[in-house]
Image: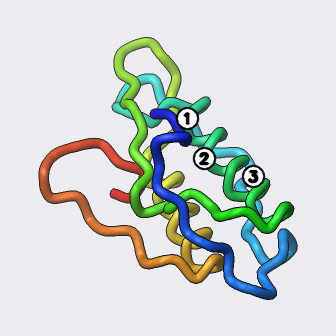
């Protein structure tokens, strides 16, 4: 995933970095499918940068992450999805949709 390809939306007036939930450490998995950590981290950093600079933020509902499998460590999807839902709400963005086509997204 390239966050450069993710659509952007304006950050609402009055939203500051202090209004955003902090991501903390996401649990990781090697046994089951996860999200590529570098892609999740890049999206979150882009959102925080947008709030700091007043630039449009990536649309969290449109973010998609590549899956990890096998021995490659990835972030547990449910933990990331829960955090991204909180982040979307803090930014006043539309809620993240439930996938219906079997693709891996940041919003399952």
* Tag 1 residue: 39
Residue 107 percent across, percent down from the top left: 39, 58
Q: Which residue is drawn at 73% across and 63% down?
A: 55
Up the image or down, 37 lies above or below 56; here it is above
User: Counting other residues with Cα less than 10 Å from the Cα at mark 2, is it few (<14), some (14-19), or many (20 or more)?
Assistant: many
Disc 2 is placed on an element classified as helix
Query: What separation in Å lies between label 3 and label 2 (alpha carbons)?
Result: 14 Å
Residue situated furthest top in the rendering: 71
Q: Name the residue under label 3.
A: 24
Looking at the rendered image, the disc whose residue lies closer to the viewer, 3 or 2, is: 2
* Front disc: 1 or 3: 1
Q: Do the residues labelled 2 and 1 touch (CB within 8 Å)?
A: yes
Q: Residue at x 71, y 45 (%)?
A: 25
Q: List the single residue furthest toward the bottom.
A: 14
Please determine whether, in this image, residue 30 is positioned above or below residue 6: above
Please state which of residues 4 and 77 is positioned toward the viewer in this rendering. 4
- The C terminus, quarter of image: bottom left
Question: Is label 3 in contact with label 2 (beta carbons under 8 Å)?
Answer: no
* Residues packed near mark 1 inside 10 Å, few (<14), some (14 to 19) or many (20 plus): some
Q: Position of residue 37 (x, y in %)?
A: 58, 32
**Residue drawn at x 44%, y 51% as measured from the top left:** 63
The x and y percentages for residue 105 are: 35, 48
Label drawn at residue 43: 2
Q: Which colour scheme is used?
A: rainbow
Mark 2–mark 1 distance (CA, rounded to whole Å):
6 Å
């Amino acid at each position: 995933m390239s966050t450069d390809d993710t659509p952007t939306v304006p950050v609402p007036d009055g939203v500051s970095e202090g209004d955003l939930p902090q991501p903390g450490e996401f649990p990781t998995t090697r046994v089951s499918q996860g999200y590529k950590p570098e892609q999740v981290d890049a999206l979150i950093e882009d959102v925080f940068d947008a709030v700091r600079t007043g630039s449009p933020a990536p649309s969290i509902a449109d973010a998609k992450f590549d899956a990890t499998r096998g021995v490659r460590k990835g972030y547990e999807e449910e933990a990331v999805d829960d955090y991204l839902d909180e982040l979307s709400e803090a930014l006043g963005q539309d809620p993240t949709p439930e996938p219906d086509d079997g693709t891996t997204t940041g919003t399952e």
